[in-house]
Amino acid sequence: MGSTSMYPLRFEPIYQYRLWGGRRLSGLLSAPLPGDGPVGEAWVLSDRNDHQSKVANGPLEGQTLGELMEQFREQLMGNLARRFPHFPLLLKFLDASEMLSVQVHPSDAHPELLPPGETGKTEAWVVIEAEKGSRIYAGLQPGTTAADLRHSLANGTIVDHLHGIVPRQGDAVYIPAGTVHTLGDGVVVFEVQQNSDVTFRLYDWGHVDMKTGQPRPLQVEQAFACIDFDGRPGGLVSPLVMTATPVERERLFDCEAFQLFRLIGQAPFTVGAAAEPRVLVCIDGSGQVEHAKIPYAVGKGDIWLLPAAAGVCGFRPNGEVTLLEIAIPE
């Protein structure tokens, strides 16, 4: 297949049971939720062996993201092809009806804590919905020591040592590896993260898994080994406006692992980039991505991967649309 044959690729979500989840993703994503139990996560772009995203449109329909990375890496990744044998990001929607565990992810500076083939895990959230009682905790209160944190685990006062945020729709929260964090009580977020599934739980609010009837295991010692007590910058971030017309383009996150921009507009504008992949996430409204004079319908909740070979594409909104555009830094 030549590079000119690559086209915008849509992927179907992979739903995940989570005891803290709900059913609100049914109003955000077009694919129906399974069963009637709590669905906490929709993995919308995943190149993990146990959960492979599949193309849902065009000649490559049914191919997994991993297969594309094996067969068409140059066309898909462009200038990044030699750096990444696997797609380096994992993208999700989270419906946190209840509180997630208080947890921390290791960085690449702790290889002894990473299973073979895994990387560190820096992540970030964009708030899609929030209720009156929703909460996000991101980082420790200044001056919190390891001894303080251990004592709080014993007496159930850990939130006294966490930096709390009352989330609002549109908020952007950065969670670098090593940051103690959690969220829940009625918040829905989009999550961008490194392609890693390593999480260490510190505290779980007394949750009992309805499937097993048992509390979920904690990994307190591993968590303490990777907590950044010096407090690298994290938490709520302020958007940086890049352009105002023809689309309002804000940069929300810019780190070594990913960049994320929010695009709000009604007039036609461009998306994608030459010689590098981009991911589009439609969080409100609808429109069409246009490539090689072919329109591809984009609806709320849709995930589109624009291969590097597709280059810059047009986007034509149907009224006002809000997109997230995700880039992988060189």
Image: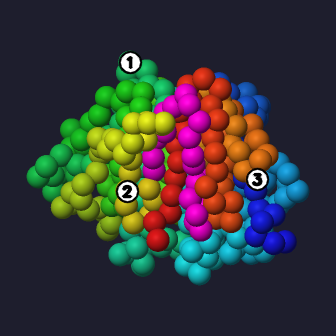
Q: Position of residue 219 (x, y in %)?
A: 42, 59
Q: Residue at x 32, y 52 (%)?
A: 180
What residue would you read off at disc 3? 292
Farthest residue in the top direction? 132
Q: Which residues are magenta?
A: 260-279
| Local secondary structure at mark 2 | strand
Give, as a three-letter code, the residue at label 3.
Ala
Give, as a three-letter code, the residue at label 1.
Lys
The tag earlier along the polypeptide, 3 or 2, is 2
* Residue 96 is at least partly visible in this image: no
Q: Residue 67 appears in which quarter of the rendering?
A: bottom right
Q: Residue at x 76, y 42 (%)?
A: 296
What residue would you read off at disc 1? 132
What residue would you read off at disc 2? 254
Give, as a three-letter code, the residue at label 2.
Asp
Are the two marked residues, 3 and 1, in contact with CB atoms closer than 8 angstroms?
no
Estimate the spatial distance between the alpha carbons at disc 3 and disc 2, rounded to whole Å.
30 Å
| Local secondary structure at mark 1 | loop
Query: Is residue 273 part of the magenta span, yes or no?
Result: yes
Closest to the camera, between mark 2 and mark 1, is 2
